[in-house]
Image (spheres, rainbow, N blue to C red):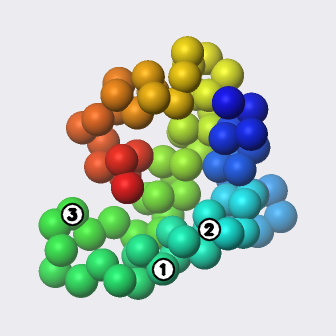
């Protein structure tokens, strides 16, 4: 869980990104591939915020599966 938290942490050196560059690139690609008229149409910042929320919650969660299940209605988390 510590590894998940560290990879999803908001970057302190690059505003608007997360610490893991591969995951950040995957989020950027997902945003680029989302049609502009999609519903919901979230931007990169929305996903970075969701990642930061997940990162902060990991030390308190029993497991990543439990967290995902508890937040099943938040589509930013489920992506």
Can residue 34 be spotted in the picture? yes
Q: Which mark is residue 29?
A: 1
Q: Earlier in the sequence, mark 1 or mark 2?
A: 2
Q: Determine contact: label 1, label 2, CB under 8 Å.
A: no
**Gap in angstroms between the C-alphas marked 3 and 2:** 20 Å
Q: Which mark is residue 24?
A: 2
What is the crowding at mark 2: few (fewer than 14 residues within 10 Å), some, or many (at least 20)? many
Q: Earlier in the sequence, mark 3 or mark 2?
A: 2
Counting from the top left corner in percent of width and height, residue 58 is at 62, 28
Q: Which residue is mark 3?
A: 40
**Residue occupying the point 48% across, 48% down:** 50
Q: Earlier in the sequence, mark 1 or mark 3?
A: 1
Instruction: For marks 3 and 2, give the one nearer the viewer.
Output: 2
**Residue occupying the point 29% across, 49% down:** 75
Residue at the outermost right position:
13
Can residue 15 be spotted in the picture? no
What is the crowding at mark 1: few (fewer than 14 residues within 10 Å), some, or many (at least 20)? few
Counting from the top left corner in percent of width and height, residue 71 is at 34, 32
Q: Is residue 17 above or below residue 12?
A: below
**Gap in angstroms between the C-alphas marked 1 and 2:** 9 Å
Q: Which mark is residue 47?
A: none
Q: Is residue 67 above or below residue 45?
A: above
Q: Nearer the viewer, residue 50 or 3?
A: 3
**Residue occupying the point 55% across, 49% down:** 51
């Amino acid at each position: 869980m510590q590894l998940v938290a560290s990879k999803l942490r908001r970057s302190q050196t690059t505003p608007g990104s997360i610490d893991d560059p591969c995951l950040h690139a995957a989020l950027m690609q997902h945003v680029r591939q989302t049609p502009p008229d999609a519903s919901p149409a979230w931007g990169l910042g929305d996903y970075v915020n969701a990642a930061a929320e997940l990162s902060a919650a990991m030390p308190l969660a029993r497991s990543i599966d439990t967290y995902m299940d508890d937040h099943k209605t938040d589509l930013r988390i489920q992506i």
